[in-house]
Image (spheres, rainbow, N blue to C red):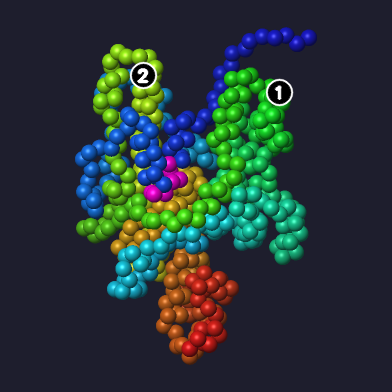
């Protein structure tokens, strides 16, 4: 006979606090989107205001973490303790880029050398795959999977069809090899890309975003098997099958609301995006100095007038309203601090790694992958991807998206490695200086690169040439 009773147990679970949700969302925004977000928050929250002592337009000062002047002072007001941010980005998250060439500096204006990135979901996923440590055959599988992902972020081709297409070419032994690469893609940015159903998409996000939350883990299994339970009319059945109390079910609904049913939606915008650099780098006293754009976001602070009203006696509803907005204002200020600090730390390591590029140009670009930065900062690779997407660095050589500085490694004759972007620059230089009547073939380019110590296959040279939008040798000869 089953007896009812009360038991007290001690356990740990990881939850995404509202301030951490906000900080992660702000990290993904571009500068233009961040400005709009700040303005919307200023319009809706009377406790938040812009400091009046803003730096003059165009002023550039060195900045570190402390220089991101975001004040959260609120005199003697009682601030709830849960506002302290005691979590990191990694508590949650387990191509073509804008560029400018060294040449034409004398004839090309800074405006003409600034481009916007036409990043799509597919190109964003390919970029992460190119920087991964997957084998060549696994990368071919990943490319095939990515090609079959639609604009919403869902896989439209069955894995059985992909296996049938690739098994002879790659000598695959079983369909599990396709499934394992698909699982790898599920954990890239955006999380859940490549899911086959809505249930699978949300289940993946629950497992990745809340790995230590028993409720999320339990719900993810059921949602994956029975996605129809997500419908509002099926909520009672979902609650029944999970055996949840009303309070726990409300907690689950809040978790589900933090998920994105269409992972590819953030890549669908066709609007023109104007670039405002997030970070600047310049050489001073023989060393490269990195600092945030002082005009990137306004310095925010708590409005003293409204904060002082909390100390006065008034209607309880008014005091409750002010306290709520004060809490939100402090969360927002700290989220801006976290975003700026993360972008600055990531950029400093990129500049440290790519000093040769800043000094000599593309041919001196060093190979670098997301993991190199992630390991140094103790963060997940997907967090680094978020921190470098649509974030721009102003250098003496032009404005570059932070993603531009990442590239895979190609072996050299000396046993070392060479950046794929450096090789592309070498190919372009060779073609720019070729005899127009006898243009260099891909085989000849391969030989010339080998003479310079770069060991690269002819098909790789052809791929890089096409990426540079340079026609084949016979087509270049026909143009003469």
Percent x, y for residue 292?
A: 31, 49
Q: Residue at x 47, y 47 (%)?
A: 386
Q: Quadrant of residue 170?
A: bottom right
Q: Position of residue 239 (x, y in %)?
A: 67, 24
Above or below 321: residue 459: below
> Mark 2: few, some, or many residues within 10 Å (few <14, many ≥20)?
few
Q: Which mark is residue 193?
A: none
From the viewer's perspective, is the residue at label 1 or at label 2 nearer? 2
User: Which element type, helix, strand or loop, lies under badge 2?
Assistant: helix
Q: Is residue 338 visible?
A: no
Which residue is found at the position 43% from the left and 60% from the top? 116
Which secondary structure class fits the magenta region best? helix
Give the Cα separation between the discs numbered 1 and 2: 40 Å
52 with respect to 86 (left or right): left
Image position, residue 230 (x, y; %): 67, 33
Q: Secondary structure at mark 1?
A: helix
Q: Which span of residues is magenta-colored?
A: 26-32
Q: Quadrant of the N terminus?
A: top right
Q: Residue furthest right?
A: 1
Give the quarter of the image for residue 174: bottom right
Q: Position of residue 474 (x, y in %)?
A: 55, 85
Asked if residue 258 lies in the magenta stretch, the reply is: no
Q: Which residue is mark 1?
A: 240
Residue shown at the point (67%, 9%) measured from the top left:
5
The residue to which callout 2 is attached is: 318
Q: Is residue 175 above or below residue 216?
A: below
Q: Is residue 245 visible?
A: yes
Q: Is 347 on the left or on the right of 207, as rendered? A: left
Left or right of 297: which side holds 256?
A: right
Crowd rating for badge 1 (residues with CA inside 10 Å; few <14, some 14–19, many 20+): few
């Amino acid at each position: 006979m089953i007896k009812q009773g009360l038991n007290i147990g001690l356990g740990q679970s990881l939850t995404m606090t509202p301030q951490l949700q906000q900080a992660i969302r702000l990290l993904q925004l571009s500068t233009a989107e961040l400005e709009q977000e700040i303005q919307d928050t200023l319009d809706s929250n009377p406790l938040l205001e812009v400091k009046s002592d803003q730096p003059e337009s165009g002023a550039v000062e060195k900045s570190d973490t402390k220089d991101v002047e975001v004040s959260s002072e609120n005199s003697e007001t009682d601030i709830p303790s849960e506002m302290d941010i005691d979590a990191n980005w990694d508590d949650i998250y387990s191509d073509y880029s804008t560029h400018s060439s060294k040449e034409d500096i004398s004839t090309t204006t800074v405006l003409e050398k600034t481009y916007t990135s036409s990043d799509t979901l597919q190109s964003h996923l390919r970029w992460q795959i190119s920087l991964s440590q997957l084998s060549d055959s696994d990368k071919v599988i990943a490319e095939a999977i990515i090609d079959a992902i639609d604009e919403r972020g869902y896989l439209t081709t069955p894995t059985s069809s992909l296996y049938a297409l690739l098994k002879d070419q790659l000598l695959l032994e079983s369909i599990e090899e396709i499934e394992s690469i698909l699982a790898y893609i599920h954990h890239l940015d955006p999380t859940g890309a490549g899911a086959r159903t809505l249930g699978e998409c949300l289940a993946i996000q629950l497992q990745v975003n809340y790995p230590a939350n028993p409720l999320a883990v339990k719900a993810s299994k059921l949602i994956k098997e029975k996605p129809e339970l997500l419908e509002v009319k099926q909520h009672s059945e979902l609650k029944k099958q999970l055996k949840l109390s009303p309070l726990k079910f409300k907690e689950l609904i809040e978790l589900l609301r933090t998920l994105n049913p269409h992972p590819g939606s953030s890549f669908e915008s066709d609007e023109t995006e104007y670039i405002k650099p997030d970070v600047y780098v310049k050489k001073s006293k023989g060393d490269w100095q990195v600092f945030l754009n002082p005009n990137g976001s306004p310095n925010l602070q708590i409005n003293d007038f409204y904060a002082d009203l909390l100390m006065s006696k008034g209607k309880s509803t008014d005091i409750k309203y002010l306290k709520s907005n004060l809490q939100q204002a402090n969360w927002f200020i700290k989220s801006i601090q976290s975003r700026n600090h993360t972008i600055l730390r990531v950029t400093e390591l990129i500049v440290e790694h790519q000093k040769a590029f800043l000094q000599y140009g593309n041919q001196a670009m060093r190979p670098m992958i997301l993991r190199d930065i992630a390991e140094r900062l103790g963060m997940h690779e997907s967090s680094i991807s978020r921190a470098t997407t649509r974030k721009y660095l102003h250098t003496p050589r032009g404005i570059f998206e932070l993603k531009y500085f990442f590239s895979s490694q190609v072996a050299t004759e000396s046993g070392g490695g060479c950046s794929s972007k450096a090789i592309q620059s070498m190919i372009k230089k060779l073609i720019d200086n070729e005899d127009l009547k006898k243009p260099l073939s891909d085989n000849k380019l391969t030989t010339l690169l080998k003479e310079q110590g770069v060991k690269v296959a002819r098909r790789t040279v052809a791929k890089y040439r096409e990426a540079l939008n340079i026609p084949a040798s016979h087509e270049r000869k026909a143009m003469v």
